[in-house]
Amino acid sequence: MKSGNRDKAEGKYSQVKGKTKEVAGKITDNPRREAEGKAEKLGGKAQDKKGDVKKAFGL
């Protein structure tokens, strides 16, 4: 798998994982887990965008 595609896939995975943590934090009234989920989701979005840039440049 090319690195751009790998970054996009890992980014999507992190977004889903982060959203899951965020929802679990809301359900259990755990603000720390909710914040961790939001941070992980944001990191996943950044990695997804990194994959877009790599694909645009053919890396």
Image: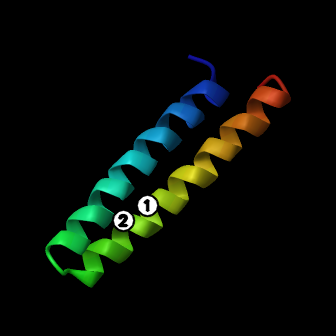
Gap between marks 1 and 2 measured at Cα: 5 Å
How far across and how far down the image is residue 25, in percent? 23, 71
**41 is higher (above) or lower (below) than 50:** below
Q: Left or right: where does residue 10 sit relative to residue 34?
A: right
Residue at 28% from the left image edge and 63% from the top image edge: 23
Residue corresponding to mark 2: 37
Front position in the image: 10 or 27: 27
Q: Nearer the viewer, residue 58 or 38?
A: 38
What residue type is disc 1 on? Glu
| Crowd rating for badge 1 (residues with CA inside 10 Å; few <14, some 14–19, many 20+) | many
Residue shown at the point (36%, 65%) measured from the top left: 37
Q: Residue placed at 26% from the left, 73% from the top?
A: 33
Vertical position of residue 30 compared to residue 10: above or below: below
- In the picture provided, is 26 more to the left or to the right than 28? right
Kind of residue sitting beneath label 2: Gly
User: Is residue 11 left or right of 55 when viewed as pictured?
Assistant: left
Q: Quick one: quadrant of the C terminus?
A: top right
Whether the residues at callouts 1 and 2 have beta carbons within 8 Å, the answer is yes
Classify 54 as above or below 21: above
Q: Which image quadrant is residue 4 in?
A: top right
Q: Residue 42's x, y, as percent?
A: 53, 61
Q: Which residue is mark 1?
A: 40
